Amino acid sequence: MAQRRPPVIGITCQHEAGDHGDRWYVNAPYIRAVAAAGGVPVLIPPAWDPELLGAALERVDGLVLTGGVDVDPARYGQEPHPQLGRVDPEWDDLDVTVARLALARDVPVLGICRGMQVLNVAAGGTLYQDIPSQVPGALAHQQSAPREEASHGVAVQDGSRLHGVLAAAHLAVNSFHHQAVLAVAPGFQATAHAPDGIIEGIEGVAHRFALGVQWHPEHLTGRDPAHFRLFAALVAAAGQPVRALPP
Ligand code: MN
């Protein structure tokens, strides 16, 4: 019997343009987590052409949308808040285009931190631009502790896809975001929350696998196996045929 080929998991590149040049790269923990879950990690840089990006998406079985800077509020029809952080239109173009393609083609997708926000914006939702000023009484969502440490709790909705994947109703997560989901996109629902009400997980209702988490599970895989299960579930979904053939 032929061995099944391991699923190819595209990981969207992160962007840095400054004194050190213009580079598209990916932080290693994303790559390690995908590979540890049995996926073939491939990096998705911009192609500056939606058709070329579409061709890239045809060659991947699943997708990770990575973390990064703020999403430009123009993407969801808002004016910039005074506390808006750095935005990067070229990076938004890459991420929003890839997210829309993945959702339209039902490619399994895991959005992480900015990646979850991108998923929500790409599907028509909105964001808080600055949690501290827009959500009175919010917890500190930008922890000073190392990335491998958890800083706040998350409650996962019973019966949700996320609950099934994590196999946990409560978990401790790290937190490195000053933005958060405000209006959940049509076709998505919020399925994990911090104790202050901030949305920490979303999922597409009709998609095969479209999950977003506001924390960084790729840094917590050594702390709690629940975080690794996000990557394992993505790779498992990516390994499934898009349509089951009739018997
Ligand atoms: Mn948080």
Image (tube, rainbow, N blue to C red):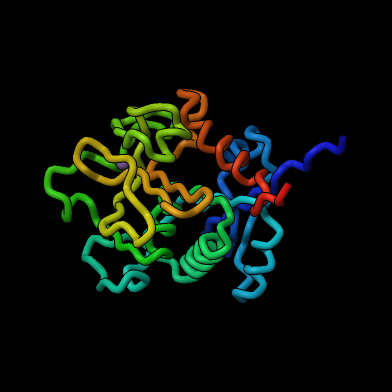
What's the residue at 37%, 35% (across, down)? Answer: 159
Residue 166 is left or right of residue 77, and the answer is right
Q: Quadrant of residue 134?
A: bottom left
Farthest-out residue, front: 247
Residue 109 vertical placement versus 171 (above, below): below
Residue 174 position within the rendered picture, expressed as x and y whole percent measured from the top left: 37, 35
What's the residue at 45%, 33% (across, down)? Answer: 164
Residue 188 vertical placement versus 168 (above, below): below
Q: Quadrant of residue 166?
A: top left
Quarter of the figure that contains the N terminus: top right
What's the residue at 70%, 45% (across, down)? Answer: 7
Residue 163 position within the rendered picture, expressed as x and y whole percent measured from the top left: 40, 34
Q: Choose between 21 and 121: the one closer to the eye.
A: 121
Total number of numbered discs in the rendering: 0
Q: Is residue 144 visible?
A: no
Q: Is residue 87 visible?
A: yes
Residue 148 vertical placement versus 77 (above, below): above
What's the residue at 69%, 48% (across, down)? Answer: 8
Ligand 1 picture quarter: top left
Residue 156 position within the rendered picture, expressed as x and y whole percent measured from the top left: 33, 35
Residue 78 position within the rendered picture, expressed as x and y whole percent measured from the top left: 26, 71
